[in-house]
Image (cartoon, helix red, strand yellow):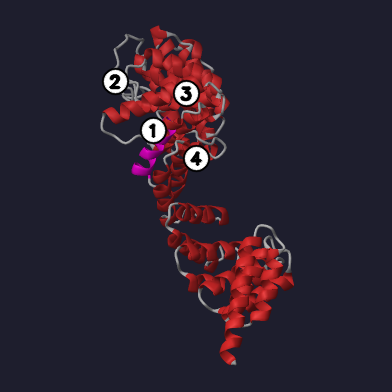
Amino acid sequence: MIMTTVTKSLSRLVLRTSVALPLVLAPAVSVTVLEAAGVSAPFAQAEAQGEQKTRKVPAMRENVFKKLGAVQEAADAQNWPAALAALKEMEAGKDKYNGYEIAQMYYFYGFVYFQMERYNDAIANYKKVLQQGESNLPVALEVGTLFTVAQLYFVTENYKEAVNYLNKWFAVSDRITADSYALRAQAYYQLGDNNKALADMNQAVSMYEKEGKVPKEPWFGLQRFLYYEKNDYKQVTNILEKLVKHYPKGEYYKQLAGMYGELKREDDMLHMMEAAYLAGALQKEKELLNMAYLFMGAEMPYKGAKVIDKGIKEKKIPRTSKNLETLAQAYQMAQELQKSIPELEAAASMSDKGDLYSRLAGIYLDLDKNKEAVDMGAKALKKGDIKRPDQLYIVLGMANANLKKYDTALKNFKEAKKDKRSEKFASQWITFVENEAERERQLAM
C-alpha cells in the first residue's frame, strides 16, 4: 500500500518538475518503504535492488515494531500529521533503540515528509538513515536509501548532490540498469558536464539496444542534443533516423531533413521533407514555401505548385502578389500555362510594378494570343517600373506585327532599339516588318 502511494506521489512530482526541465527524463521511482523497510517479520529489507549480499545487523524488537506499526497505520490512512506525531513520540525515546531501529524510524520520517511534500526534510531524514553506518544497515536498505536521496535531490533540482549520491549508489549497487545511466546522464547535463552526460546516455542506449529493446524517446532526445552541441551531424542524423523509425513524428522528419541538408544529401532531404509534409508537420508559410521550392529545384514543379495552391486555399500561405507569382512560376515550369495565367494575373494586379504584366504579355504571345499580349503590355507600361522595358517593347512589336498593325509594331521595335541589349534583334524585326508592310501594299494594288 505504502510503496504504491510513494510511487504515485513521486510520479506526480516528476510530472510537475519536468515541465521546467526540458530534455530531462523524469527519474525512475525506487523508493523503499516498510515492509520494504523491514517492518514486518522477519524484518527483511526491500527487494527492489534484487538479491544483494547480506550483512548482519541488530534485530528489531517487538516494542519498536509496534511503534512503527502505529506509524504504518496512520500512513495507510494517509493521515500524515498523525504519522509524524507518532514518529516524534517515538524519537523522544530513541536513546533506547539500536542503530537498526533508529534507521527504520528515520526511514519512516523520510517517507512521511515526502508525502507532505517537504522534500528537504525528507532528504535530511533519509541521510540520517545512512548515518547509522554499515553495521546497522542491511545492504538493500543502504543501497535503496542512497538511490532515494539521489532521486530527491534530482527532483528538487540540486543536481550536484544528485550526482554525488548517484555515484555513491553506483559504487555499491549490483543492479545498475540502463535507466540508472540515463538518470545520471541527465543530472550531468543539468550541471553542464556534457561529456559525462553523453557517455552515460550512450551507455543507457547501448544497454537497451543490446537487449533488443527500443531506447526511450527522451534518451534519444538528450543524446541527439548533446551530439548536436558537438557539431557531430552524422551522429545526430543516425539518432534522428532511429527516432523517425521508432517514434515517427513530423518534427523528427523536419529535423532529419535539416541534417540531410547539412550533409549535402539533397535527395534524402527532399524525401524526408515530403514525409514531414504528408504527416502534416509543415504548417507555417515559410515551411510550405520551402517544400515547394525543393520540389521545383528537383524538377517536380507540379508538386510544388500543388503545395502552394493547397496552402493558399487553407490560408496557411497568404494570398500575396509574391506568393501568387511563385505559384504561377511553378505552373509555368510544369508546362501548365493555362493554370499559370490566372495566378500571374492576380499577382500582377496586386503588384505596384509592371514586371508581372510584362511577363504575362510574353506568355500570351507564346500562346499566340496577340490581342491579350498587347493588353497586358499596355497595363505593364501604365504601371511602369519595369526592369527590361526593351524586352516588353519587343513582345509588343511582335504581337502587333502578328495583328498586322505594322506602324504600331515599328514604333515598338524602335523603342526597343534604344537599349543596346536589344538593338540588333529590334533592327532585324524592323527590317522584317517594313518588308511585310511593303509586300502587303503591293498585294493590295
Quadrant occupied by the C terminus: bottom right
Main secondary-structure element of the magenta-colored stretch: helix
| Disc 1 residue type (three-letter) | Met
| Disc 2 residue type (three-letter) | Pro
In this rendering, the answer to whether 104 lies above or below 400 is above
In this rendering, the answer to whether 371 lies above or below 307 is below
**Residues at marks 3 and 2, CA–CA distance in whole angstroms:** 41 Å
Look at mark 4 in the image and give the residue it sits on.
15
Observer-nearest residue: 320 or 363?
Answer: 363
* Secondary structure beneath label 3: helix
**Residues at marks 4 and 3, CA–CA distance in whole angstroms:** 22 Å
| Disc 3 residue type (three-letter) | Ala
> Callout 2 environment at 10 Å: few (<14), some (14 to 19), or many (20+)?
few
Look at mark 3 in the image and give the residue it sits on.
197
Decide which of tag 3 and tag 2 comes sooner along the chain.
2
Query: Which residue is rendered at x = 52% and y = 77% of the image?
Result: 368
* Secondary structure beneath label 2: loop
4 or 1: mark nearer the eye: 4
Looking at the image, residue 149 sits to the left or right of residue 354; the answer is: left
Look at mark 2 in the image and give the residue it sits on.
42
Find residue 1 and report its image quarter: top left
**Residues at marks 1 and 3, CA–CA distance in whole angstroms:** 30 Å
User: Can residue 398 be seen in the rendering of this structure?
Assistant: yes
Label drawn at residue 186: none
Query: Which residue is rendered at x = 47% and y = 35% of the image?
Result: 10
In this rendering, the answer to whether 141 lies above or below 55 is below
Find residue 156 and report its image quarter: top right
Decide which of tag 1 and tag 3 comes sooner along the chain.
1
